[in-house]
Amino acid sequence: MRVLPVGDDALLVEVSSGDEAEALHAELLRRRAEGSLPAREIVPAARTVLIDGLDSPARLAAELTAAELPPPPSRAHAVVEIPVRYDGPDLPDVAAHWGVPVPEVARIHAGTEFRVAFCGFAPGFGYLTGLPPRYDVPRRATPRTAVPAGSVALAGPYTGVYPRSSPGGWQLIGSTDVVLWDHTRVPAALLAPGTRVRFVPEAGS
């Protein structure tokens, strides 16, 4: 673990894996909820956690440096099911990369339980892990200028669902009508770090 100062009242904690970042994020949230960690924002990423709005960042840095990483968080969260049509334009390319028939991509993807490792890129966008490393896929050589909202996509070790139309270079394998971000909903984001997710093929998909 490496702890770096960021400005006057924030720390960036670097760890060696996504699982460690998830475990640290869960522990920091627990401490904030019980009142022992006054922090304005606790933001996980692939292998870092940003802690912002601290009264005494130097003291927390010393505590974190001396402490052992917490155990992985419990996976007792309820599963969010996302109905999906496996109709993406990049299905043939993903199938070729995986070395499987096109219908097998949907079977493998829908048969996997995912977990939101962290959020970013756009409000409501979760980086979902769960596929074994052999199913990592590269980003497209040429990104699209507009990816439709609801597109289910793969890039590297991650699965994601575009909450709104935006440029993107991920491989599109499907689509969903689920609303990932709704500012009138509480919470606005359907997905949060730690959320378990399953994709459910729609009839005929």
Image (spheres, rainbow, N blue to C red):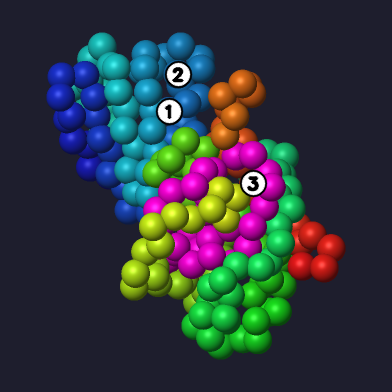
Q: Which residue is mark 3?
A: 196
Whether residue 47 is situated above or below residue 113 in the rendered picture: above
Q: Secondary structure at mark 3?
A: strand
Q: Nearer the viewer, mark 3 or mark 2?
A: 3
Spot occupied by residue 48 in the image (x, y as percentages of width and height)? 32, 43
Q: Which residue is mark 2?
A: 32
Spot occupied by residue 81 in the image (x, y as percentages of width and height)? 73, 48
Q: Which residues are magenta?
A: 152-180
The crowding category of the residue bearing disc 2, from other C-alpha atoms within 10 Å (few below 14, some 14 to 19, many at least 20), is some
Spot occupied by residue 124 in the image (x, y as percentages of width and height)? 52, 38
Q: Which of the two discs, 3 and 2, labels the residue nearer the N terminus? A: 2
Q: Where does the C terminus fall, quadrant-wise?
A: bottom right
Rounded to the nearest angstrom, the CA distance separating label 3 from label 1 is: 20 Å
User: As shown in the figure, which amino acid type bears the numbered disc 3?
Assistant: Arg
The crowding category of the residue bearing disc 1, from other C-alpha atoms within 10 Å (few below 14, some 14 to 19, many at least 20), is some
Q: Secondary structure at mark 1?
A: helix
Q: Which residue is mark 1?
A: 28
CB within 8 Å, label 1 to label 2: yes
Whether residue 2 is situated above or below residue 136 in the rendered picture: above
Image point (57%, 34%), residue name:
181
User: As shown in the figure, which amino acid type bears the numbered disc 1?
Assistant: Leu
Q: How many marks?
A: 3
